[in-house]
Structures are given as C-alpha cells and as structure tokens.
Image (spheres, rainbow, N blue to C red):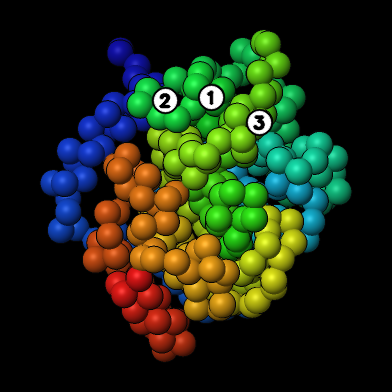
Amino acid sequence: MLRVTRRELLKAGLATAVLARSARAAVATPVYLMRTKDRAEGVRRGLAAVGFPSARGRRVIIKPNFNSADEFPASTHLDTIGALVRRFQAAGASEITVADRSGMGNTRRVMEHKGVFAQAKRLGFQAVVLDEIPMEGWTQERLPGGHWSRGVLFPRLFQEADVLIQTCCLKTHRYGGHFTLSLKNSVGMVAKNSPRDGYNYMGELHGSSSQRQMIAEINQLYRPTMVVMDGLQAFTDGGPESGTLVAPQVMVLGADRVAVDAVGVAILRMHGGNATISRGRVFEQEQIARAVQLGLGVRGPEQIDLITEDPESRKLAEQVRQILTRG
C-alpha cells in the first residue's frame, strides 16, 4: 500500500492554497469567541463549537508559548496546557507531546521554572525541548520566494503529528514583531541555531527589516489542527515578557491562524493597544498581510464567522466585527 506522509500532504496542500482560497472566497471560517474566567471551560466549549478533532489512537502535539519563564500572559498558562491534555486523553490520543523552544532564555530552564516537566509527569504527557533535538530530527526548508536567506530548520515531530494544537497568548511585541499571537508563536518551532554549522536563524530574523514577513513565511511549513488563544489577560504595549497588563477575559479558538490573529489584534485595539498595532486596517498589519498573500487563511473580515454562545460574548463579537471592518 502506498503511504503518503503528513509532510507530503502538507506540501501538496500548501502548493494549491492560493487557488483553493479564491474558490472558497464566499465561505466563512468559524472563530469561537467566549468571555470567560475559566480556561478549562473555554477550551471545552470552544473545541466542541468549532469541531473537536478526531484523536483516538493518534499522536497529538501541543505547541505552547514558553518564550520565557515569566508569568502569563508572557507565557502559556499551565491550566491551558492541562485542559488540552485532559481533553485529548479523554478522546483516546495514543500519545501527547508538548514541545517548544524559548527565545529569551534556556528552554530547559524555562520549562523547569514554569513547572512543565512536573506537570508532564503528573498528567502523563511528554515534554520536549526543541533545542536538544539532534540534526536528524530537523528538516531544512528553503521557503522559496521568501525573505529567509537559507530557509529554516523545522522539527520533524511537528510535521509527523496527527493532531497539532497551537496555544498562544494575547500580547504585543516590542522587538519588531508588533504582536505575538499564533503566527508569531510559530517562530518557536524553528531552530535558533543549526546543530550542523551553528548558523543563527534568530539572529537573521531579528536583524531583518522584513521580520514580520519572515514570521508569516514560517507558517507555510505546517497547518495547525486548532489554535487556542488564551486572552484572559493580555499586554497591550511592551511584550513579549512584560508590558501593560489588561484583562480581556476571553478565549478564542479556530483552525485559521489569519482569522484568529485578526480577532486578537481587534481585541488588543479594544483595550488600548499601542500605536503600532492600532495603525491602519487590521488586515494591513504586515504579519497578517503577508500570511494572506501566502494563502494561509482568510483574506478579509467578511470571511470570519464569529461564533458565540451567550449575550456577553455576542456583545464582544459585535465590537470585534466593527473594528475588523472599519480598520
């Protein structure tokens, strides 16, 4: 029997993404929006509303934001990880892995400080430090037509996952990204340094005037099954490890990174987001505009279907729609 790998399917899908997107222009993509103070409830109801992925007997990978050891919203709250792990264990996943690479510290020490390894032992999942993967665990991806001079190294474990969940925070980014939501969270998937020759990919990224386009380009290398954005708290200025703290008290879930990030930017604007993320239309933000150009998600606000289940969430959704449509 001919076996088609997940990586081959991803590449085939991405090769036709732009043409397929135009054919689906009239189809809206669902984004679940819930006002809540309960992460576990937000995860449960959001997955049910948007469509819980089949997990029985499958390998589930969770990509958090463990950029630093600072407290949420600087990094993913362990309650969000716990809620996801329990949901997929109950759904019969064969194995669950939480994997990341930190940008502002030693990843192993960051994860130890956060309590990730202790949680992994307690709940029965595997915690992986991406920096410690040997060369054979990476693939060289060239990203033709992009701004990366030699492409990036991308972990095979993300390409080989059956179910890939990305969970991000809601915050601005003062080091050139402008905001760090699901598109930017993908930077933590790629290697900082090449295990083969020591090349510093992150040095290239952060030294480039095309940083925001390069962030979007990484996202061509995978498709998340679901994005979970924890917005119980957020940074509207500063970031990624500290900033102006607000409490939107919202969970956002969807499979479309462009749609989720556009909603996230709109929420940041609602809470007094800084001048950089509040300038122009949401879909003119460089990360989002480049992702649209690459066919990675919705092309505009009219293709986002905000799903809510209660009056307070519906009120929030209407405010988000107004920001998305007026710029």
Q: CA distance from mark 1 to mark 2?
A: 8 Å
The amino acid beneath tag 1 is: Val
Residue drawn 69% across the image and 73% down it: 245
- Tag 3, which secondary structure? helix
The image quarter containing residue 208 is top right
Disc 1 target residue: 152
Q: CA distance from mark 2 to mark 3?
A: 17 Å
- Tag 2, which secondary structure? loop
Looking at the picture, how far across and down is residue 83, in whole percent?
Answer: 63, 59
Disc 3 target residue: 203
Q: Are marks 1 and 2 in contact (CB under 8 Å)?
A: yes
Residue drawn 23% across the image and 39% down it: 18
Q: Which residue is at the front of the view, 39 or 102?
A: 102
Q: Which residue is at the front of the view, 181 or 76?
A: 181
Left or right for 215, reference 122:
left
State the quadrant of the N terminus. top left
